[in-house]
Image: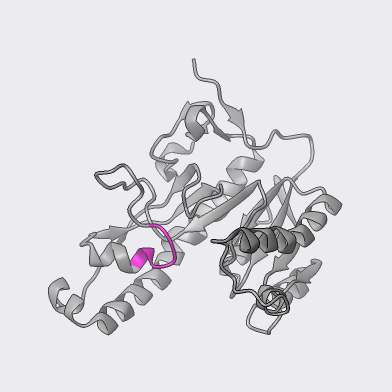
């Protein structure tokens, strides 16, 4: 018998969610459109205050509190780049995140939903969505398609289909426990892959098109579904950080077919 702990234990009230975003917020919109009785989005937080984030518009539309703390300006005023590779960089990132941490405490947040949040996060308790199948590993056992260029790299590697994944974040880049994996999107190339790889700008355009198409069958499906399963107390973490659904180990991530 395995020992599994639900990520959230229902407490006779909706799970309280904080939505973090940096851009268009399409994933956050999908959370709000669900109108779930099991979770409620309590506020929207953005790391951009330069008009490039749609968070304020979404918050206004749904009558939610909105907070923006511009990370570029935060670092510029301190004479530091955004990298966290140094001790000072990590210390500054924790200082930046301390503002959001106070908001999480004030709103009694249970889970952070990262919907296109482009900053490294030093806070615990977050679900992220990634445009790749994180169950795919290389010969060395590491996840193959991580980081900002995952779709491009998957297509360049000859993958015939793409999927989106959700994960419980940790201190690494797309390295946290895998929670859910979407249905596939077939890769459709306008020319042989070798020819596209000889023209990187063409391969880049193909990757961008596929990443946009993947949202509808991938991100926008598994992201809200993951939050819903957590809110229902069905999704948990077992030994080694392996996802569990209703107490059953899901080492390859929960698939839609697994959900009754």
Q: Position of residue 168 (x, y in %)?
A: 55, 46
Q: Is residue 230 depicted above or below 116 in this figure? A: above
Q: Position of residue 10 (x, y in %)?
A: 72, 35
Q: Residue at x 82, y 56 (%)?
A: 102
Which one is nearer the viewer's eye here, 186 or 17? Answer: 17
Looking at the magenta stretch, what is its main secondary structure?
A: loop
Q: Quadrant of residue 255?
A: top left
How many dots with numbers? 0
Q: Is residue 150 visible?
A: yes
Q: Which residues lie in the magenta part? A: 146-151
Q: Position of residue 148 (x, y in %)?
A: 44, 66
* Residue 129 falls inside the magenta stretch: no
| 136 horizontally vs 231: left or right | left
Q: Is residue 63 visible?
A: no
| 30 horizontally vs 38: left or right | left
Q: Quadrant of residue 204?
A: bottom left
Q: Quadrant of residue 117?
A: bottom right
Q: Return the residue found at the far right.
A: 106
Model colouring? one colour
Q: Residue at x 70, y 79 (%)?
A: 73
Q: Is residue 148 depicted above or below 56 in this figure? A: above
Q: Position of residue 85 (x, y in %)?
A: 54, 61
Q: Return the residue found at the far top.
A: 1
Q: Residue at x 64, y 54 (%)?
A: 122
| 195 horizontally vs 61: left or right | left
Which one is nearer the viewer's eye here, 74 or 36? Answer: 74
């Amino acid at each position: 018998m395995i020992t599994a702990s639900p990520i959230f234990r229902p407490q006779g009230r909706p799970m309280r969610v904080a939505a973090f975003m940096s851009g268009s917020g399409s994933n956050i919109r999908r959370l709000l459109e669900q109108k779930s009785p099991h979770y409620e989005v309590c506020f929207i937080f953005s790391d951009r205050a330069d008009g490039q984030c749609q968070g304020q518009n979404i918050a206004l539309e749904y009558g939610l509190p909105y907070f923006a703390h511009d990370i570029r300006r935060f670092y510029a005023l301190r004479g530091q780049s955004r990298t966290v590779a140094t001790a000072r960089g990590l210390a500054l990132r924790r200082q930046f995140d301390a503002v959001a941490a106070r908001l999480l405490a004030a709103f009694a947040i249970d889970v952070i939903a990262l919907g296109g949040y482009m900053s490294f996060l030093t806070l615990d308790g977050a679900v992220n969505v990634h445009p790749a199948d994180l169950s795919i590993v290389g010969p060395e056992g590491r996840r193959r398609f991580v980081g900002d260029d995952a779709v491009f790299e998957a297509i360049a590697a000859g993958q015939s289909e793409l999927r989106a994944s959700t994960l419980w974040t940790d201190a690494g880049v797309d390295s946290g426990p895998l929670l859910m994996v979407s249905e596939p999107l077939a890769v459709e190339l306008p020319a042989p892959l070798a020819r596209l790889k000889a023209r990187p700008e063409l391969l880049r355009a193909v990757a961008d098109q596929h990443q946009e198409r993947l949202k509808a069958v991938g991100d926008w499906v598994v992201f809200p579904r993951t939050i819903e399963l957590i809110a229902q107390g069905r999704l948990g973490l077992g030994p080694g950080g392996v996802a569990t659904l209703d107490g059953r180990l899901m080492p390859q991530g929960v698939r839609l077919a697994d959900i009754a």
